[in-house]
Amino acid sequence: MKAATTRLGLLALATALSACSVLDGDKIDYKSATKGSTLEIPPDLTQLSRDSRYATVPGGSVSAAAMQAGQAAQPSGTANAAAITLGDVRIERDGNQRWLVVNRPANKLWDPVREFWEENGFILTQAESNVGIMETDWAENRAKLPQDIVRSTIGKVFDSLYSTGERDKFRTRLERNSNGGTEIYITHRGMIEVYSSSTKDNTVWQPRAADPELETEFLRRLMVKLGVSEEQSKAVTSTAAPRQPAARVATVNNAPVVQLDEGFDRSWRRVGLALDRTGFTVEDRNRNEGTYFVRYVAPNADKKEPGFFSKLFSSNTATPPLKYRIVVRGQGETTTVSVLNEAGAPESSANAERIIRVIADELK
């Protein structure tokens, strides 16, 4: 009881301190949440059991061809993006998106990227080289804790009493490009602990917005892991980016869609990042057809809590996952994002509306 009271008292202080930039003074020091308090995620966002054809290859490596099996080599689609090259690594920027392009095959990058996350204090809960995706567990940035004299003397003994009230998870996606190299994307998801009542005697976890600064910082650190110097990496990631065009929800042929005032290449990348940030299980993708193959667990209709993030403390659900196709169709400088069912037919159900709204909210 005393431990809980101390922890709740520290939560308010940690929340006030979180307004400061997490990157000030290079303050990043993650501790895996699995080593301390556990954090379960909503059943409609959890990473579900995969089909056996997506299982990790023994030994953790796979050829670039296998990672994109069945898909023709695609142009990188970065003609309009700013690029800065350092050795065989370059960072691309398009609007507020950043990603790395490395002139090495995916099978040469898989192990270094996996080592990178482990060296930064994370445990990988997903590492599927067949589809080029790895994901960390929920972890806490311990550098955001106040470094006062009290913690410096007793904090090392009672370290579990201290908490930032925040957890972070990162997904890394590797995609082969037409030149035999690899594009690397990093996306962030966050949770925050808040008081559940005015008496402040209990807390609950709820989602918080993705942090582009954290994504950029880990891209920069990954550049260093891949051979770029600290000074060079800081110089090329410090430029501010312009605001992205907004997304809007519309209805076309009685089905919900997202409309974007930009071409296919930019929309394809933005939708992919949106799916990663919101935790969809992306089983496969086909850029030729503009299709992401995803799985989704619908919220329980009997629950009183509204919204996509309606349940936070149970990953068990009797509802089977449903398979959908997120289709990106470009025509000139406009793009439409729609939802198809597993058979490829247009979907206009309540689930389709939820999926479209979640994607649109992330793209805004």
Image (cartoon, grey):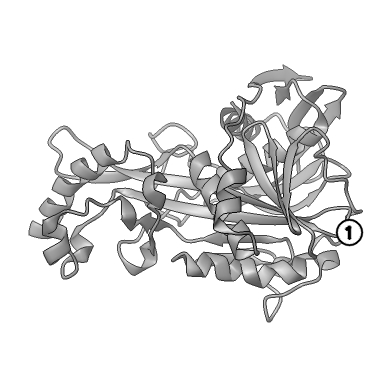
Quadrant of the drawing holding the N terminus = bottom left
* The quadrant where residue 246 appears: top right
x and y, in percent, of residue 308 in the image: 50, 36
The percent coordinates of residue 129 (x first, y second) are 70, 67
The image position of residue 170, as x and y in percent, is 53, 54
Please state which of residues 125 and 139 is positioned toward the viewer in this rendering: 139
Quarter of the image containing the C terminus? top right
Q: Residue at x 19, y 68 (%)?
A: 156
Q: Is residue 106 left or right of residue 69?
A: left
Asked whether, in this view, residue 7 is left or right of residue 55, the answer is left
Identify which residue is drawn at 65% across, 64% down.
227
| Amino acid type at mark 1 | Gly
Residue 193 left/right relative to 211: left
How many numbered marks, from 0 up?
A: 1
Location of residue 172 with respect to 81 vertically, above or below = below
Of residues 60 and 43, which is closer to you in this image?
60
Where in the figure is residue 334, as x and y percent of width and height?
A: 80, 22
Q: Which residue is mark 1?
A: 70
Residue closest to the eye, 16 or 324: 16
Q: Which residue sits at x=79%, y=59%? A: 103
Of 127 and 172, nearer the camera is 172
Q: Is 341 drawn above or below residue 109 in the view shown?
A: above
Q: Is residue 355 visible?
A: yes
Which residue in the rendered view is the most extreme toward the right? 72
Q: State the residue at coordinates (30%, 61%).
A: 37
Q: Residue furthest left?
A: 2
Q: Residue furthest bottom?
A: 59
Q: Secondary structure at mark 1?
A: loop
